[in-house]
Amino acid sequence: MKIALIAHDRMKEEIVQLALAYEAILSEHELFATGTTGKRIMEATSLSITRCLSGPMGGDQQIGAKIAQNEMDLIIFLRDPLTAQPHEPDIIALLRLCDVHKIPFATNLGTAEILLRALERGELDWREIIHEEKE
Ligand SMILES: O=C(CO)COP(=O)(O)O
């Protein structure tokens, strides 16, 4: 599965802790992240991550493009609900594309943990069927 990990600045520590706690599960998948989030996670874990641009520089849009091309299966995006972001339109666009393409999307730690446990149990395997259908 292709998984994107994204966190706003005030949520970076949370996503690092999440990645550490679920490192064994995450290591079995292909990981992507926006620039700084990916850097922070790679510094704290032994996970290998393909880094896109930083969010404000277009990283959310790069992840969005992968969703549109059926190249992303799960998004964990720990958004900061209390700070305005200069690239808010990009963030909304990413959310919208997840809804268009029915991609599981977690915006907080509670949901992120549920999705990662579901992933471990194979409950997201239906994504493989979608891949086969679109080939
Ligand atoms: O801004 C972001 C998502 O909208 C995250 O970008 P960084 O991971 O580069 O901080």
Image (cartoon, rainbow, N blue to C red):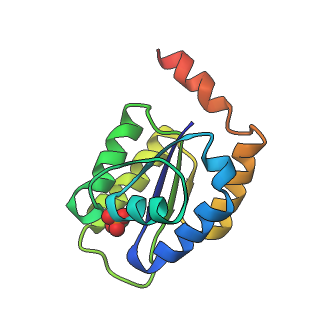
Q: What residue is rendered at 60% in x and 45% in y? A: 27
The residue at the far left in this view is 57
- Residue situated in front as seen by the camera: 39 or 102: 39
76 versus 110 height, above or below: above
Instruction: Relative to 77, say whether 28 is above or below.
Output: above
Comparing 68 with 49, the one in front is: 49
* Above-or-below relation of 109 to 64: below
Count of picture labels: 0
Q: In this view, which residue lies farthest toward the right?
A: 121
Position of 7 with respect to 127 (left or right) is: left
Please report the residue visible at 67 percent of the width from the left and 68 percent of the height from the top.
110
Please state which of residues 47 and 81 is positioned toward the viewer in this rendering.
47
Location of residue 110 with respect to 73 vertically, above or below: below
Where residue 126 sits in the image (x, y, percent)? 66, 30
Give the image quadrant in which the ligand numbered 1 is located. Answer: bottom left
- 94 or 23: nearer the viewer: 23
Q: Is residue 37 left or right of residue 25?
A: left
Q: Tell me: 50 left or right of 28.
A: left
Q: In x, y percent, where is residue 61?
A: 29, 50
- The quadrant where residue 83 appears: bottom left
Residue name at image x 62 percent, y 69 percent: 109
Residue 64, position as x, y percentages in the image: 35, 46
Q: Horizontal placement of 60 versus 1: left or right?
A: left
Residue at x-position 21% and y-position 60%: 57
Residue 93 locus on image (x, y percent): 33, 54
On-image quarter of the N terminus: top right
- Residue 89's image quarter? bottom left
